[in-house]
Amino acid sequence: MLKVEGLKAGYGAINILWDISFEIADGEIVAILGSNGAGKTTMVRAITGMIRPSAGSVQFNGEELAKKSSRAILDHGIIQVPEGRQIFTEMSVLENLEMGAFNKQAKAAFDKNLEMAYTWFPKLKERSKQAAGTLSGGEQQMLAVARALIGMPKLLILDEPSLGLAPNIVDDILAVAASMARKDGIAVMLVEQDITKALACADRGYVIENGHISLSGTSRELESNEHVKKAYLGI
């Protein structure tokens, strides 16, 4: 599904990513791991068209996306839940969810997907008429994830979903993502600093350090890797 090869990107004259290569298949959950400042968010921005790579390839279902606009990439089915959620705080919960139905297909299936979203996150139904900015941090993250899933993604990118949230809320959100991957074949790219939670959810993972991929493997392989244990798991 997603194939990234030799990706190089940064901001102006400052390069952040160097020769990033990885793949994600249909229905697979792949964790992109690393500490703050490692280059994870820059990589997400390069894949989603928010910045243009200076070199390399981003292919999605065989089509090159590296030079396409963010909107064109969104239309291909790559939908991101950004770090910090970025919901519309003055709009109601329901209005935020309606914003997820950005194309004809998602609009046609909105009622069905809305009920599914309320099944995933019942609190959103209880607060459907409430201003999104009055929700708790965890509820806002649920809203951001539900809004993305209403868009019917083929690849769902979760950028730091655990940031500032209680562990049980993170578990609920990751469980929904895992269910969608298993049942509906949605690919999930999980970008996380919390390596323990990410590897518990993911099939495979890649570790980014200083703009390079330093390690890759199955979740079990990375959990047992001595460098990962010492640098990230505190073991």
Image (cartoon, rainbow, N blue to C red):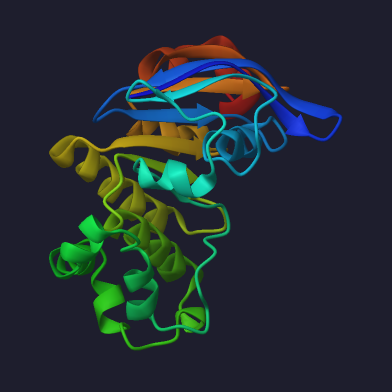
- Is 46 above or below relative to 50? above
User: Which residue is painted at 86% across and 30% down in the image?
Assistant: 13
Residue positioned 67% across, 31% down in the render: 39
Q: Position of residue 88 (x, y in %)?
A: 51, 74
The reply, left or right, for residue 182 in relation to residue 216 is: left
**Quadrant showing the C terminus:** top right
Q: Position of residue 92 (x, y in %)?
A: 40, 83
Query: In the picture shown, does residue 33 fall above or below 176?
Result: above
Q: Residue furthest right?
A: 13
- Label count reads 0
Is residue 27 shown above or below 104?
A: above
Instruction: From the top left corner, tell me how far across and down residue 126 is, in percent.
Output: 26, 82
Nearer the observer, 188 or 45: 45
- Residue 55: percent from the left, percent from the top? 66, 19
In the displayed structure, would residue 12 be above or below residue 55? below
Front one among 100 and 215? 100
Instruction: Tell me: 32 left or right of 202.
Output: right
Please state which of residues 227 and 62 is positioned toward the viewer in this rendering.
62
Image quadrant assignment for residue 96: bottom left
Identity of the residue drawn at 38% across and 56% down: 168
* Residue 160 seen anywhere in this rendered image of the structure: no
Residue in the image at 25% along x and 27% along y: 26
Looking at the figure, which quarter contains the N terminus? Answer: top left
Instruction: Answer yes or no: is residue 103 visible.
Output: yes
